[in-house]
Image (cartoon, grey):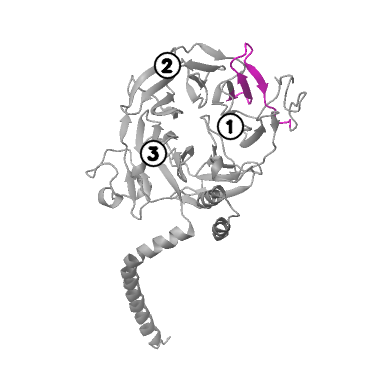
């Protein structure tokens, strides 16, 4: 950091380089923030956002946002202030992240509003949530009850409901398109398109042979869509075409379809091939739209060059775990946080979050879930879910904050803690620790006196 400051003072480094260096330093210092918790129960006499030691006396690891488990979370991309969470209990909760201040005291965040289980909302577990990409005053939710709902954030009431007659695993709304088409991955073999303008939900994209588990619109081409299915394929679509499918990705193809110009122009479409050897339940685009990331039940994550459809051959090792049917989306860090031509991925593993270099496949960091044993656990009927599977990740816009949802019902915060910040905290807590250290010293001296008295006595064996 000193070198960057010197370069800025000498005029050899621009402000963008200095900003990127500081953000990167904080980003690589991310670790668990056990002092921040999310309690989905009503406030116990202290009001929303009450300090932990004033209201909640139990260990913070026992705090749960949704008692039955958290299936998904999402954070608005404008202010980065509000987070919504969807539970296996069919409820949706709104959290104000400005209340989750990184203080030395333990801090419990309480929901600012909640949508309860009801026929007008959801009756089964929530599968996926997303804010409107152009307005955080509305968000969408999908559920195992076959419904896609549109909510007003201020009132937390459903303004539109679409019954798709099939389990909806995930959905996607384009951040750049003029259309308001919501792509839905359902238990059916076709991708369903819901038009929020007209209210129509009859259009579908046929091509997969089994349930569709994940969908994602391209961040740069408003009519291009990617989908992953339990038939082991990842397929690309152009919704303007009569034959919508652009083809499938093939894990055995590391060259791609180059066409006349080397970028796929006038190239034939590939209709044979599999992206994974098992179900594909995660599809994510990079910010620049040049690469697609897929996750599958073969416990592999693959990166694809979208100019040709070639497998980039990134290998992330044998530590990847992915066995659940639900959608599992890797989180790609915003490009301004890392250097040019670099990309970092957070992968939601069981009992931990893995941080990788996306293109090299290098493991950069393992973030262990605090308070959870790494050993496998077993449970019988009626016992709480202790597996602590990481179900969803969300990045807070405008901050260096990561949030994770877990099957044990907890939402956990991951915040940067640089050496300078750690030293500052130690200095602030030094006065409080002094009295405790003095007490420990007196007890240690008393024990030493007792030990010396015992060793001075002569012991005779008879």
Q: What element carries label 1?
A: strand
Q: Tell which circle, 1 or 2, labels the residue nearer the N-terminal end.
A: 2
Left or right for 370, reference 188: left
Quarter of the image for the C terminus: give it. Answer: bottom left
Query: Residue 353's mark?
Result: none
Residue 341 percent location from the top left of the image: 64, 42
Q: Quadrant of residue 124?
A: top left
Residue on which the image places disc 3 = 81
**Region in magenta:** 225-253
Residue on which the image places disc 1 = 285
Cα–Cα gap, marks 1 and 2: 26 Å
Q: What element carries label 3?
A: loop
Q: In which quarter of the image is residue 210?
A: top right
Asked whether the viewer can see residue 229, the reply is: no
Cα–Cα gap, marks 3 and 1: 24 Å
- Farthest residue toward the left? 45
Left or right for 379, reference 301: left
Cα–Cα gap, marks 2 and 3: 28 Å
Foreground label between 3 and 1: 3
Viewer-proximal residue, 137 or 361? 137
Q: Tell which circle, 2 or 3, labels the residue nearer the N-terminal end.
A: 3
Asked whether the viewer can see residue 39, the reply is: yes
């Amino acid at each position: 950091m000193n070198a960057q400051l010197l370069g800025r003072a000498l005029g050899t480094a621009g402000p963008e380089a200095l900003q990127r260096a500081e953000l990167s330093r904080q980003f690589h210092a991310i670790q668990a923030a056990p002092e921040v918790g999310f309690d989905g129960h009503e406030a116990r006499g202290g009001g929303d956002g009450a300090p932990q030691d004033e209201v909640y006396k139990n260990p913070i690891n026992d705090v749960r946002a949704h008692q039955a488990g958290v299936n998904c979370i999402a954070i608005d991309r404008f202010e980065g202030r509000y987070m919504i969470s969807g539970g296996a209990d069919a409820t949706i909760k709104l959290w104000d992240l400005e209340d989750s201040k990184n203080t030395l005291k333990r801090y419990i965040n309480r929901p600012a509003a909640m949508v309860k289980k009801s026929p007008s909302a959801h009756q089964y577990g929530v599968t996926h949530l997303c804010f409107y990409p152009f307005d955080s005053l509305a968000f969408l939710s999908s559920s195992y009850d076959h419904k896609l709902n549109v909510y007003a954030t201020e009132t937390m009431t459903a303004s539109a409901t679409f019954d798709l007659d099939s389990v909806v695993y995930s959905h996607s709304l384009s951040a750049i398109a003029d259309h308001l088409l919501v792509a839905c991955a359902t238990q059916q073999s076709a991708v369903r398109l819901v038009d929020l303008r007209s209210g129509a939900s009859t259009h579908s994209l046929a091509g997969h042979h089994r349930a569709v588990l994940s969908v994602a619109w391209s961040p740069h081409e408003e009519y291009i869509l990617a989908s992953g299915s339990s038939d082991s394929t990842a397929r690309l679509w152009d919704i303007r075409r009569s034959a919508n499918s652009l083809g499938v990705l093939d894990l055995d193809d590391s060259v791609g379809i180059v066409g006349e110009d080397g970028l796929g122009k006038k190239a034939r479409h590939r209709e044979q091939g599999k992206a994974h050897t098992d179900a594909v339940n995660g599809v994510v685009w990079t910010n620049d739209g040049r690469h697609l990331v897929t996750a599958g039940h073969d416990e592999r994550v693959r990166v694809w060059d979208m100019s040709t459809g070639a497998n980039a051959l990134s290998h992330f090792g044998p530590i990847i775990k992915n066995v659940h049917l639900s959608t599992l989306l890797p989180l790609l860090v915003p490009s301004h946080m890392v250097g040019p031509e670099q990309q970092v991925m957070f992968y939601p593993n069981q009992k931990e979050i893995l941080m990788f270099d996306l293109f090299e496949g290098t493991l950069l960091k393992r973030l262990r879930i605090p308070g959870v044993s790494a050993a496998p656990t077993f449970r019988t009927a009626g016992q709480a879910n202790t597996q602590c599977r990481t179900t969803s990740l969300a990045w807070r816009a405008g901050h260096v904050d990561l949030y994770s949802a877990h099957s044990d019902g907890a939402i956990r915060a991951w915040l940067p803690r640089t050496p300078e910040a750690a030293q500052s905290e130690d200095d602030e807590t030094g006065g409080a620790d002094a009295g405790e250290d003095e007490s420990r010293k007196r007890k240690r001296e008393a024990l030493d006196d007792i030990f010396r008295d015992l060793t001075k006595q002569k012991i005779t064996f008879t």
